[in-house]
Image: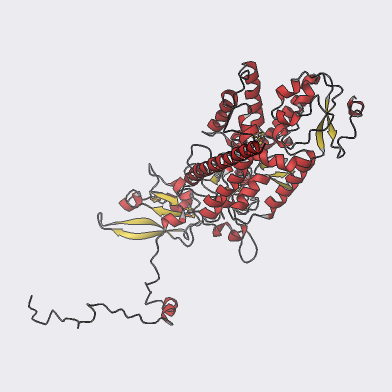
């Protein structure tokens, strides 16, 4: 079970949130209402997605305070727990792209690493900025027009319609096209959360001494460029692109990776970690 | 060494140029698609929605309005289960901006709830509570302008002389938004036409009339206000209306001179004009 601890926890969180959102519409529950764009927690606390909020602001519309406050709350939350925790613990598309990625490994589609010249992992930041520009030009929140994330979530709450095609497209793209193509290269929401979580408190920490260099972690990691320190240095993963999914921790047979509170003097401690987390 | 850094710089320039180019290309395609996707002129929005252009900017697609509409107390069937809601969230393939709320009167019209549950929940301001709040500070659904009902007289059977006042009876603002006009039926000589007439200053566009209409395709239907109304223009002045006359008070005479107007007017009826 240890091998799947965080994976199962994440799936449970993702599904629970979807059930709560679904129930808000279907049964009138007042726990978590709305969609990721903007929600209400326990009938009072406003929540809003920072990137969606930025897009609406870019159109020139002066948003209601509920959304602004909601976006501030969400930004603060992910600023602390790690921006892309949204990706691995909340976003429903993560289940789709994880499945595609898993199948890819199963079908050995990964053996030949193709070099996609045009598609760099930095593309998402360009897209993020572009999304704001297009929102301003066209006068509509531009990413929301095609966002698979909210299309999938609304699909689950209100019914899919033809919108399911976008989700299937993402799945196929990640399976047969580029490895981690959507979440790792294109998604501007993931990019926004990467930026928000740059300095987050909760981080994965590597223990170089315990590592046996099996590289299991790099195989499962959807952003494996962030694990550059594996078997090199005992430091935290500080890159904002780490999704805090904990898959690397799950698969590591040598306890060389663990969640920890970010230590700002990273290089000072190198052992310690194992003792803290052995419980 | 110098050569190497030169190469690096060239490579860097090329990659930057490429990124900028691709971004521009993407931006064009994306803009085109988004612009296309938001073009859905004949859609009816929830009560208090901002004018369509602003509404499309503002709506954050949270669905809170649709959820409030579905789960309002007045929307229960006999067993206490929620009925389908008036407000639906646009799905892919429905040719409306995806994720925005709308309603279709022939599916479920708006029941004009007194407490308008759908409006105060809107977090973005796309639904403007002030526009449905009266001077006393109370919510007033009669101030909503979701659309305007229009009668197509050729398919309305009341215009044929049959007795039908289904729309009139369905209207929550009966005798205000729709009135019946009586006319003599010259064809039979002894019957009356009872003709439904909609008044645009009162009609909220709820669509209850459209839902109630008895004809195969409704003869009365709600259109977005700007598609259901014309505009006479400011150069028409109602001579019998003192208020309207006031508009002329400070008007200055504009005298245009053309080649033609310089000639005397010809009294051609009394003159023997030679052609
Ligand atoms: S990158 Fe985008 S789609 Fe992927 S999990 Fe994060 S928010 Fe969701
Ligand atoms: S006023 Fe109309 S749209 Fe709003 S909750 Fe009532 S029925 Fe639904
Ligand atoms: S509540 Fe407001 S922002 Fe949310 S979907 Fe409805 S109109 Fe849009
Ligand atoms: S839409 Fe029809 S039923 Fe509703 S107020 Fe107007 S005339 Fe009356
Ligand atoms: S219900 Fe339809 S057919 Fe009957 S009077 Fe009204 S518009 Fe005409």
- In this view of the protein, can residue B92 be seen by the observer? yes
Residue at horizontal 61 percent and vertical 36 percent from the top: A186
Residue A31: image location, x then y, percent: 73, 40
Q: Quadrant of residue A7?
A: top right
Residue B90: image location, x then y, percent: 53, 41
Residue at horizontal 54 percent and vertical 57 percent from the top: B144
Residue B47 vertical position relative to residue B271 in the rendered view, above or below: above
- In this view, the residue in front, A239 or A202, is A239
Residue B138 vertical position relative to residue A264 in the rendered view, above or below: below
| B205 sits left or right of A13 in the view | left
Residue B275 vertical position relative to residue A7 in the rendered view, above or below: below
Q: In which quarter of the image is residue A62?
A: bottom right
Extreme residue in the top direction = A107
Query: Which color scheme is applied?
Result: secondary structure
Residue B11: image location, x then y, percent: 60, 37
- In this view, the residue in front, B40 or A242, is A242
- In this view, the residue in front, A229 or B126, is A229
| A152 sits left or right of B35 in the view | right
| A60 sits left or right of B222 in the view | right
Residue B27: image location, x then y, percent: 53, 44
Q: Quadrant of the N terminus of chain A?
A: top right
- In this view, the residue in front, A56 or A35, is A56
Q: In which quarter of the image is residue A12?
A: top right
Q: In which quarter of the image is the C terminus of chain A?
A: top right
- In this view of the protein, can residue A5 be seen by the observer? no
Q: How many labels does the image show?
A: 0
Residue at horizontal 11 percent and vertical 82 percent from the top: B270
């Amino acid at each position: 079970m240890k091998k799947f601890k965080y994976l199962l926890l994440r799936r449970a969180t993702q599904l629970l949130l979807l059930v709560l959102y679904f129930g808000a519409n279907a049964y009138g529950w007042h726990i978590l209402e709305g969609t990721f764009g903007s929600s209400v927690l326990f009938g009072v606390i406003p929540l809003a997605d920072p990137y969606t909020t930025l897009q609406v602001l870019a159109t020139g519309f002066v948003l209601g305070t509920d959304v602004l406050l909601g976006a501030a709350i969400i930004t603060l939350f992910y600023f602390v727990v790690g921006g892309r925790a949204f990706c691995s613990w909340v976003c429903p598309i993560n289940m789709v792209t994880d499945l595609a990625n898993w199948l890819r490994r199963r079908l050995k589609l990964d053996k030949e690493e193709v070099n996609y010249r045009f598609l760099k992992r930095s593309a998402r930041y360009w897209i993020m900025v572009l999304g704001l520009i297009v929102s301003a030009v066209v006068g509509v929140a531009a990413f929301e027009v095609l966002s698979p994330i909210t299309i999938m979530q609304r699909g689950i709450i209100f019914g899919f319609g033809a919108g399911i095609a976008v989700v299937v497209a993402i799945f196929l793209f990640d399976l047969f096209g580029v490895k981690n193509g959507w979440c790792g290269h294109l998604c501007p929401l993931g990019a926004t959360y990467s930026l928000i979580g740059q300095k987050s408190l909760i981080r994965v920490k590597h223990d170089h001494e315990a590592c046996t260099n099996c590289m299991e972690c790099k195989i499962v990691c959807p952003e494996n460029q962030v694990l550059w320190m594996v078997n090199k240095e005992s430091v935290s993963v500080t890159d904002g692109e780490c999704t805090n999914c904990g898959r690397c921790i799950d698969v590591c047979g040598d306890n060389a990776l663990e969640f920890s509170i970010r230590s700002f003097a990273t290089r000072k401690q190198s052992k310690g970690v194992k003792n803290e987390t052995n419980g | 060494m110098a050569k190497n850094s030169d190469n690096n710089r060239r490579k860097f320039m090329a990659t930057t140029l490429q990124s900028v180019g691709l971004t521009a290309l993407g931006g064009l395609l994306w803009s085109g698609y988004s612009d296309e996707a938001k073009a859905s002129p004949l859609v009816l929005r929830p009560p208090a929605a901002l004018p369509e252009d602003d509404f499309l900017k503002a709506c954050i697609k949270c669905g809170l309005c649709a959820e409030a509409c579905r789960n309002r107390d007045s929307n229960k069937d006999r067993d206490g289960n929620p009925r389908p809601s008036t407000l639906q969230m646009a799905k892919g393939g429905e040719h409306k901006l995806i994720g925005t709320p709308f309603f279709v009167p022939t599916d479920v019209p708006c029941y004009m709830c007194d407490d308008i549950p759908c409006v105060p929940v809107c977090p973005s301001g796309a639904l403007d509570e002030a526009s449905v709040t009266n001077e006393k500070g109370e919510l007033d659904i009669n101030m909503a302008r979701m659309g305007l009902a229009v009668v197509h007289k050729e398919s309305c059977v009341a215009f044929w002389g049959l007795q039908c006042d289904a729309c009139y009876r369905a209207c929550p603002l009966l005798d205000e938004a729709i009135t019946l006009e009586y006319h003599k039926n010259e064809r039979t000589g002894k019957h009356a036409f009872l003709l439904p007439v909609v008044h645009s200053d009162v009609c909220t566009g709820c669509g209850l009339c459209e839902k109630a209409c008895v004809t195969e395709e409704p003869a009365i239907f709600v259109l977005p206000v700007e598609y259901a109304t014309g505009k006479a223009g400011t150069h028409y002045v109602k001579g019998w209306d003192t208020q309207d006359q006031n508009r002329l008070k400070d008007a200055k005479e504009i005298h245009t001179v053309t080649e033609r107007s310089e000639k005397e007017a010809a009294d051609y009826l009394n003159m023997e004009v030679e052609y």
